Amino acid sequence: MQERETFNNHTVYSLSDVAMSLHKMIERTYTRPYYIKAEILKLNYYPYSGHCYPELVEREGNTIKTEMRAVIWSANFKDINRRFTQITGEPLKENIRILCLATIQFSPKHGLALHIEDIEPSYTLGEMVRNRQEVIERLKKEEVFGLNRKLTMPLLPKRVAVISVETSKGYSDFMQTLHQNEHGYRFFTELFPSILQGEKAITGILSQLEVIGKRQSEFDVVVIVRGGGGDVGMSCYDDYGLTHRVATFPLPVLTGIGHSTNLSVTDMVAHANFITPTDVAFSILECFRRFEEQLNDCMTKITQQAQMRLAEVRQSLMHTETVLQYKLPKVMDEHRNRLGELAKEAVFKSKELTMNQSFQLKGFLQELGKQMQIHLHREQQRLELLRNQLPKGVRMTLQKRANECDSLTEKLHLLSPENILKRGYSITLKDGKAVKNASELLPGEQIQTRFYEGTVTSTVNG
């Protein structure tokens, strides 16, 4: 027998030794299948081989307490998934709780794993029902369960945002029923495409509701319609996030997702729910039909009231005509006499008024003459004063300007070139022009330097 390697007086074991020991121990200890409850974190199904390698977890609150790999061989997976779908209405998928019958095996190469032989669908179905009830109770506790139903449905919901699949029969039935109605009602509809079953439906519908919410003012209602297929993949409509958004959405939400066997939580919190997309379209058309009936009733009542009022007015006019025919001659005579009296009184008043105005006009003209004489006298005095002051002002102005001219002449004399040269400055000339910058001169050129007395000629050296 080969001696084992040692280190610090301790035996050293290979990894395979440990693995084989665990394999034998688990094989001796776990000799039969066990019922195990867990949550599928990831399904890891491979269609090519047909095998499935679920990752199972047990949670404590939001924390994963335990995690373990599992295996469902293709021979079992097809039957397990088929029976699971028939009973629960959903295929095996991630984020669901299961009760499975499994053996516990340890492979030296692949490690510990649960080999699932069967899954009990009724357990998962019960968990789905429990989760669904928890969502309902949570929405009610948060007081949002009935919010969307409390919204007022627009009188004429003409602008419809539709969440559906463009190629689905349900969407086609909805559009045909709505736009090809026999009454000729006109609608504006816009499709917001989304997957409508399975886990991806949750994110898809939520994403489109977010887009519609940002354009809320452009629509009257939101419609979620789905046609064809059974109840498989419908548990997404019991998701808390989706149902909460529908319940709190600011526009009425109408559902027609074809869930005929059980009412989903989304149906419960929506403003109204229907089995088929066609029923949703008919409900919208019904709003217009009711309004048209009310409008026709109002028109009938208005016509009747107008006819009654016209009859009353006609009778009143006839009575007024009779009274006028009797009283008109007497009234005409009274007014004719009154007009004569008013004409005499007007002649007298006009003469009296003319005399008063004449007296007032004479007084005004006399007063005006006096005021003109006073004003002319004042202006003459003012003119005489200006005539006396004018020569003195002119002399002062001329003297001031003469002083200014003398000052400028003195400054010009001081700034003349001769006076500047006299103070010791000189001027350098080239070709008779003053040089202002040394860079203008080149070696060998002749320059003249002018002083106050005399001029010197020089040659530029460099």
Image: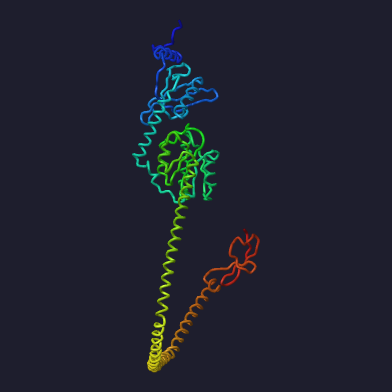
Measuring 47% from the left and 81% from the top, which residue is drawn there?
A: 403
Q: Is residue 369 above or below residue 425?
A: below
Occupied quadrant, residue 31: top left
Q: Going by the image, does 452 lie left or right of 127?
A: right
Residue 377 in sight here: no
Residue in the foreground of this view, choosing between 313 and 122: 313
Identity of the residue drawn at 55% across and 39% down: 167
Q: Position of residue 173 (x, y in %)?
A: 53, 41
Query: Where is 181 relative to 55, above or below?
Result: below
> Residue 4's x, y, as percent?
43, 9
Image quadrant in which the N terminus is located: top left
Q: Position of residue 371 (x, y in %)?
A: 39, 92
Q: Is residue 461 visible?
A: yes
Above or below — where is 352 with respect to 164? below
Task: Residue 68 in the image: state x and y as whole percent.
Answer: 42, 23
Colour style of the rendered protein structure:
rainbow
Count up the numbered dots: 0
